[in-house]
Image (spheres, rainbow, N blue to C red):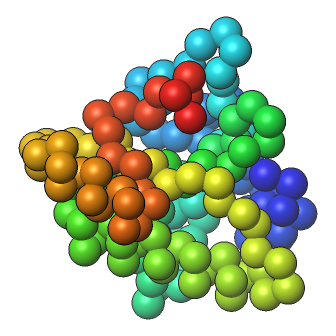
Amino acid sequence: MDDFQAHPLWAQSVCQGKQALKKEHRALVLESKQHKVVQSLDFDACLKNLHLEHKRWDYMVEIHASKTLAFEVHAYDPKGLLDKKNGTLAILQSEFAQSPPKVDAWHVAVLGALPRQDLLARFRAETQIHIQRQLDLSKV
């Protein structure tokens, strides 16, 4: 999260632990003694009136070993999720032209119905987006 903390757009919005996540979304991130959210950022809220041409992911969370995960709470919508990932990458490229922050993994906590496991596996293989009911940090 160092890159976000050094950028004026996000510097004041990086929070300790899961504090940047909306209250109703915090329970969707499962922590343990060894696997905790170190810092979080409400990525979408920081861009409320900026980059309106791009859909974007809800949150960035930093976990152990300084890994940054993109975390989204959303219905299963393959095209919409891919559009959000691509929009987020475009925003990062635009804001950090020289060296955009690395997102180590993309995770979605799905609200509503999930497709068959074979469709989820194919979607993950094609997009590198992990779909689950909750983000279990011990499995990241």
Q: Nearer the viewer, residue 93 or 130?
A: 130
Picture residue at 52% right of the left edge, 40% below the top: 21
Q: Is residue 66 above or below residue 9?
A: above
Picture coordinates of residue 43, whole percent (x, y): 58, 60
Picture coordinates of residue 109, whole percent (x, y): 34, 42
Picture coordinates of residue 126, whole percent (x, y): 36, 68
**Residue farthest toward the top in the current orientation of the protein:** 33
Within the image, what quadrant is residue 122 found in?
Answer: bottom left
Relative to 59, 28 lies left or right? left
Relative to 93, 137 lies left or right? left
Picture coordinates of residue 28, whole percent (x, y): 40, 30
Picture residue at 66% right of the left edge, 76% below the top: 92
Picture residue at 44% right of the left edge, 33% below the top: 135
Q: Is residue 97 above or below residue 105?
A: below
Picture residue at 40% right of the left edge, 67% below the top: 127
Q: Nearer the viewer, residue 34 or 88?
A: 34
Tell me if I can see residue 41 in this picture. no
- Position of the C terminus by quadrant: top right
Q: Nearer the viewer, residue 26 or 114?
A: 114
Relative to 73, 34 lies left or right? right
Tell me if I can see residue 127 in this picture. yes
Q: Is residue 85 above or below residue 50?
A: above
- Counting the numbered discs, the total is 0
Q: Nearer the viewer, residue 39 or 8?
A: 39
Q: Is residue 44 above or below residue 75?
A: below
